Image (tube, helix red, strand yellow):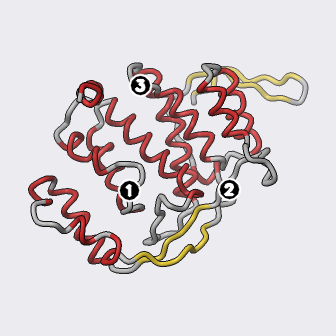
């Protein structure tokens, strides 16, 4: 930022100028990393190999075939659940601020939904689910490029805070079946969709493969997006064709 003017009013310092660049820093969003809890061991030969190593899959999509072979070759791996932080939630209650925000959004009251989600982030910037839902509502159907760019910032914040919580050299799994890490996976998925919509096919491709590396069970359906992204299909055209099928 280039600063043109600086002044104080009361106890607050104000700046005016021009922003030259910006970045999202996971160490700022998550100074205390989210916890990771061991939830067992996953064996690809028992739960994965029969489906993904069938003859013909390499002809269907070579990147998925390469990924599947690597998953099997890696053998048994530990499964972790990521800590889920939702400020204002009460374990004794069935709903929480995120659930209430979703209810507002479904009723068409996005202002109320945004206010609840922003309040969650004011309480703790590690609330990945708040970022993920803000990204989802800003992305919408992907028709707006401006909305997509706003959504990408939300998803990047969640991804950065989540990545901050993974130790260096992390080789464990974040399977969809464990609820706590779903906000992180949703953020990576949403960011991949934003990259795709904005024409960053390489970025989208890497994100969808990364999702599959974290969770070979693929509860979010990233495997269905790899081929159209690799083919550099337009996101909006792909959505229209999917709706027509």
Give the alpha-carbon distance from disc 3 to disc 2, as whole Å: 33 Å
Q: Quadrant of residue 173?
A: bottom left
Q: What element carries label 2?
A: loop
Is label 3 or label 2 in front?
A: 3
Q: Residue at 74% x, 35% y: name it.
A: 119
Other residues around mark 1 within 10 Å, as few (<14) / some (14–19) / many (≥20): some
Q: Is mark 3 on a helix, strand or loop?
A: loop
Location of residue 53 in the rendering, given as x and y in whole percent from the top left corner: 19, 68
Point out which mark residue 141 bears. 3
Drawn side of residue 133 relative to residue 75, left or right: right
Give the alpha-carbon distance from disc 1 to disc 2, as whole Å: 29 Å
Q: Residue at 41% x, 25% y: name it.
A: 141
Observer-nearest residue: 151 or 10?
151
Location of residue 19 in the rendering, given as x and y in whole percent from the top left corner: 55, 27
Image vertical order of residue 30 relative to residue 24, above or below:
below
Tell me if label 3 and label 1 are in contact, CB under 8 Å: no
Question: Quarter holding the C terminus?
Answer: top left
Q: Residue at 48% x, 46% y: name it.
A: 186
Other residues around mark 3 within 10 Å, as few (<14) / some (14–19) / many (≥20): few
Other residues around mark 2 within 10 Å, as few (<14) / some (14–19) / many (≥20): some
Q: Earlier in the sequence, mark 1 or mark 2?
A: 2
Image vertical order of residue 152 relative to residue 211, above or below:
above
Drawn side of residue 54 relative to residue 73, left or right: left
Q: Name the residue under label 1.
A: 218
Q: Mark 2 points at which residue?
A: 31
Tell me if label 1 and label 2 are in contact, CB under 8 Å: no
Is label 1 or label 2 in front?
A: 1
Observer-nearest residue: 243 or 124?
243
Drawn side of residue 151 relative to residue 196, left or right: right
């Amino acid at each position: 930022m280039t600063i043109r003017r600086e002044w104080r009013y009361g106890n607050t310092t104000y700046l005016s100028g021009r922003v030259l660049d910006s970045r999202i820093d996971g160490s700022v969003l998550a100074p205390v990393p989210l916890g990771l809890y061991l939830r067992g061991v996953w064996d690809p030969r028992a739960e994965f190999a029969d489906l993904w190593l069938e003859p013909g899959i390499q002809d269907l999509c070579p990147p998925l075939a390469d990924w599947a072979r690597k998953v099997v070759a890696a053998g048994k791996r530990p499964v972790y659940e990521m800590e889920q932080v939702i400020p204002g939630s009460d374990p004794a209650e069935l709903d929480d601020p995120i659930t209430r925000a979703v209810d507002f959004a479904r009723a068409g009251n996005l202002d109320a939904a945004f206010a609840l989600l922003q309040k969650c982030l004011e309480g703790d910037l590690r609330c990945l689910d708040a970022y993920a839902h803000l990204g989802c509502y800003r992305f919408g159907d992907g028709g707006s490029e401006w909305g997509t760019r706003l959504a990408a910032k939300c998803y990047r914040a969640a991804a950065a805070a989540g990545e901050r919580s993974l130790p260096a050299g992390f080789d464990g799994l974040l399977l969809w079946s464990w609820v706590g890490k779903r906000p992180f996976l949703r953020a990576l998925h949403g960011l991949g969709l934003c990259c795709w919509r904005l024409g960053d096919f390489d970025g989208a491709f890497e994100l969808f493969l990364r999702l599959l590396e974290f969770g070979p069970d693929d509860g979010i359906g990233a495997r269905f997006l790899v081929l159209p992204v690799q083919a550099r299909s337009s996101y909006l055209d792909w959505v229209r064709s999917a709706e027509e099928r």
